[in-house]
Image: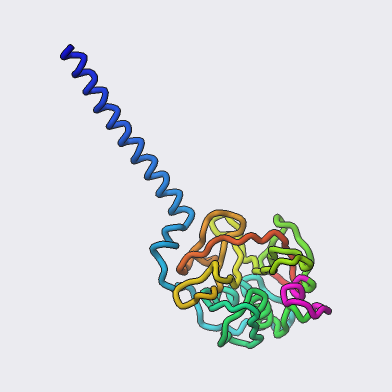
């Protein structure tokens, strides 16, 4: 009887040890998944910052051709710039006021070509619709830096959203865009310009060169892709 009790005690100790090992493995895996998704950045890095270049560069083309690298450089200058619905500012240089999604796209191309991309549209509707009209459809697998992403068709009753494709970050397609309250931060309650990974659960906190920004940005859901009707070269 005594030996049976000892065996039972040993078995209970073994079960506790294995249960502890299993718990450590589960916690480690959970922590790794949460960290990979970028949620630590959401909760523990709330201060607004950006380690990339923010000093304005005059990259305006004299020939009408736009380099893809210049699109990335110009767009990333405004990481963490404030968002406000319906705001546009076609100015050469860093905007003084906030921008909305379509206003940001127009600002980028205005500073690279001297003309608003939306001006190519014959329409007078919403700015996002005019950007749609100023571009041609491409498939997701055909995306190149400088192409545009949209969440809705122009005739949709829902508010459309637009961003600029800048390449891949850690194997995920990345768009820079002026996002609303879902991308709010301290002092930027209406939203801000961020770089998001598209159609994934992962958050993002870096630009195309690896420079970090905070807080991290949740993903986007662009499903329609279009190429601006201007000459873009590598």
Identify the colour scheme used.
Answer: rainbow
Q: Nearer the viewer, residue 192 or 205?
A: 192
Location of residue 41 by image quarter: bottom left
Q: Is residue 59 magenta?
A: no
Which residue is most to the top? 1
Residue 44 occupies quadrant = bottom left
Q: Is residue 10 left or right of residue 96?
A: left
Q: Which residues are magenta?
A: 121-132
* Image quadrant containing the N terminus: top left
Q: Residue at x 82, y 78 (%)?
A: 123
Residue extending farthest left: 2
The vertical placement of 104 against 166, above or below, is below
**Residue 75: image x %, image y %?**
59, 74
Going by the picture, which residue comes out furthest to the right? Answer: 122
**At which x and y percent is residue 20?**
30, 36
Q: In the displayed structure, does residue 170 sit left or right of residue 8? A: right
Seen at 78% across and 73% down, the residue is 134
Q: Nearer the viewer, residue 116 or 114?
A: 116
**What residue is drawn where x is 77% and y is 68%?**
154
Does residue 115 sit above or below 195 in this rendering?
below
Measuring from the top left, give residue 61's x and y in whole percent. 69, 82
The residue at 67%/68% (across/down) is 161
Q: Report the label total.
A: 0
The quadrant in which residue 162 appears is bottom right
Left or right: residue 231 compared with residue 56: right
Q: Position of residue 49 (x, y in %)?
A: 44, 73
Locate the C terminus and report the quarter of the image it occupies.
bottom right
């Amino acid at each position: 009887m005594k030996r049976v009790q000892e065996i039972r005690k040993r078995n209970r100790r073994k079960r506790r040890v294995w249960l502890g090992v299993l718990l450590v493995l589960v916690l480690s895996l959970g922590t790794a998944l949460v960290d990979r998704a970028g949620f630590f950045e959401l909760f523990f890095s709330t201060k607004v910052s950006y380690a990339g270049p923010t000093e304005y560069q005059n990259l305006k083309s004299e020939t009408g051709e736009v380099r893809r690298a210049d699109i990335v450089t110009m767009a990333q200058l405004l990481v963490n710039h404030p968002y406000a619905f319906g705001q546009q500012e076609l100015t050469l240089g860093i905007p003084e006021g906030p921008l909305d999604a379509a206003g940001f796209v127009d600002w980028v191309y205005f500073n690279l070509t001297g003309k608003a991309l939306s001006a190519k549209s014959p329409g007078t509707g919403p700015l996002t619709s005019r950007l749609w009209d100023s571009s041609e459809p491409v498939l997701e697998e055909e995306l190149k830096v400088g192409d545009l992403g949209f969440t809705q068709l122009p005739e949709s009753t829902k508010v459309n959203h637009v961003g600029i494709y800048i390449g891949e970050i850690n194997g995920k397609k990345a768009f820079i865009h002026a996002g609303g309250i879902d991308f709010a931060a301290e002092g930027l309650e209406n939203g801000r310009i961020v770089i998001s990974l598209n159609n994934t659960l992962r958050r993002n906190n870096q630009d195309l060169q690896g420079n970090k920004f905070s807080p991290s940005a949740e993903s986007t859901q662009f499903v329609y892709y279009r190429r601006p009707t201007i000459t873009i070269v590598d």
